Amino acid sequence: MTIMTRRTALIASASLLAMPSLARAQGAPIHLGTLTPLTGAGGPYGPVMANCVKSVITEVNGVGGVLGRQVQLTSEDDQTNPEAGLRAARKLIDIDRVAAIMGTWASSVTTAVAPLCWENKTFLTTVSGADSITALPHNGWLIRTQPNTTLQGRKFGEYAVELGGKKMFFMAPQTPFTQSQLANMKPPIEAAGGSIELLIYDAAKPSLRTEVDQAMRARPDIIILGGYTPDTTVLLRDIFRAGYRGKLLAYAYSVNQQMIGSLPHDVTEGIYTLAPSPAQGSGGFDRVKRIVGNDNPDPYTCQIYDQVNLVLMAMAVGNDATGQGIHDNIRRVSQGGGDKVDNVMDGLRAIAAGKKVDYDGASGPCDFTDAGDITDCKFRYDQVRGGQQTLIRIA
Amino acid sequence: MIEALLQALINGVIAGTILAVPALGFTAIFAVLNYPNFAIGALATVGAYAGWVGNTVFGLPMLGALPLAFGVAGLAGLAVQSLAVKPLEASGALMMAIASLAAGLVLENILRFGFGNDLRGFELPLLRDWRIGEFRIGPQQLENFGLALACMALLWAFLRFSRTGRAMRAVADNRDLALLRGVDPVRVALVTVIVGAGLAGMGGMLVGLDTSVDPLTGTRLVLSIFAAAVLGGLGSIPGAVAGAIAIGMAEELSVIVFNPAYRLVVGFVVILIVLTLRPAGLFGTRAS
């Protein structure tokens, strides 16, 4: 008969208690989620974004994953709708137990989902621009790779002045960023002796003739379009029919190549667009081009590519695959000097070699303030010429 | 200000006339089958896509694409009725309405699966509006207005002069009496669903002609269609037309008076007022 000594019993008990974590370390996958608009107004972007993340994770899993664990991705559809987005986020957090949710697109969706994330210690990375998002009391539980509307609004105002406008008319649906966009457009326009009026319309309306009549009565020399693709399509048709001959300035995410292809050239010709620019020519940008099979990947796909790279490297550098681990370590890989990397594979190798990394990605340098905003971003200025978005400059 | 009001009224009458086509389909189905078919929005989208395919793939002119929109949406409506709604007939109107809502979501996503989320435009030149003094009106608007009126005239002739149309009206007026007179209820239901869904499809195509086609084209109209039918009196054919024109005008006029962001409120307020003051609607005979 074998008598178990006190020491043997303690070792055996400790081993038993440690077994679940050992099992996890050896095999339990790390769960991550994307919450992008696969349908609705953001539908042209969400599927490409989700596929980009899938591609990065497949590559990482091919070399053994992160911290010796495979990464399992769950992609959900926020339908460009806060209510649907909230339901999908609940599923990702409660059922899939993801450590991070990546890629929320519409500001209304991000605003709805963010509190759920920080309450459940799930890290959130977003491409939404509304100022109000990083002003939420998130305590470091979110970052965004999109410049906020303070910066975007100012750029729109400055560009409208540069285009020679004096009387601007801003037409937009009700979104969390409409008012702050207007507020930030005003100073450069008013400083140049111009004026701007706002009309908020219902994005679900099949015809906006009466709204366009309102705009025409103001006799603007530039109309600034602040909507998403479906409602801006309706608006552009009605503006054309109304015989408007002035200039049009819009977000590049609404007047995109898909919309330009769906409308007669007369309607879209000459429209100026403005958008945060990806870091064209960078290594990260070239990788996204290869992933999506397109020489001109959209800014949101570039941003979510950066987000998944940063999340995976943060887990590795902190040796912690939880939301808390990402929260605590993401700035250790995004900024602060070290080996410059533009993809997670190089980043993981450098981290394993004990080096400090500083990620510069496909969308830009990806350095974040304490509030979660990016500190630097270039803008891309295009004009529709002959049915194609034609680059004017990146600045 | 007077010019703005009159222009909004012109816009409203035209928008309302186009809205009347799917509203007629909705109310016809309600009159004969006694349940609100909320798949009507998705059926309008089916019609819009069918018309778009007819126009852009087969090169059909608008007058050729409209019957295609009617036919394909009619068949889709029949599928919704047979597969989703009819099995729940015994459970009452509420269950049938919920089944139609679910079937509409399925249809919408089938379209999304097949066509993607891209916006589709008909191969039509986009023309500048004609200006008459202070007012403007679009050639496409006028053509759509004419097509909507023609659809309504055809429906009226069908209901007035054809044997099947008279049978539909008989079942809508008094189902038991119609059955006693030998009307075949299964056939009448079948024809009603095809005609109702087909009208929704034509309405969807008319909206798509003026704007663009995407998987949510019809869904955006559902509240306005429902409000038009409730205002006119659920089940009343002339009521649906009057209700749709009234809703169209109210929605456009509200843009002048209120912040345009509150346009959707118009539909809800109309439903609330009608259900409170006159549940049967303007032309209805039964409170439903």
Image: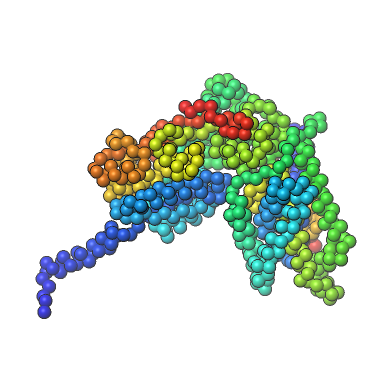
Q: Residue at x 55, y 41 (%)?
A: A175
Q: What residue is rendered at 84% in x and 61% in y?
A: B159
Can residue B265 be seen at all in this image of the molecule? no
Q: Is residue A354 above or below residue B1?
A: below
Viewer-nearest residue: A178 or B76: B76
From the top left corner, tell me how far across and down residue B226 is, in percent. Answer: 70, 55
Asked if residue A72 lies left or right of residue B42, the reply is: left
In the displayed structure image, the side of residue B197 where residue A358 appears, left or right: left
**Percent x, y of residue B178:** 83, 72
Which quadrant, please, contains the N terminus of chain A? bottom left
In the rendered image, residue B201, in percent from the top left (x then y), is placed at 72, 54
**Quick one: which residue is furthest to the bottom in this view?**
A1
Residue drawn 29% across and 52% down? A67
Position of residue B235 in the picture relative to residue A59 (left or right): right
Measuring 57% from the left and 45% from the top, which residue is drawn there?
A41
Tell me where residue A130 appears, x and y as whole percent: 49, 39
> Is residue A312 or residue B32 the one in the foreground?
A312
Q: Name the outermost residue toward the right.
A: B161
Against A79, residue A27 (above or below) is: below
Model colouring: rainbow
Nearer to me, A298 or A245: A298
The answer to which image quadrant residue A333 occupies is: top left
Q: Is residue A374 above or below residue A222?
A: below
Q: Quadrant of residue B200?
A: bottom right
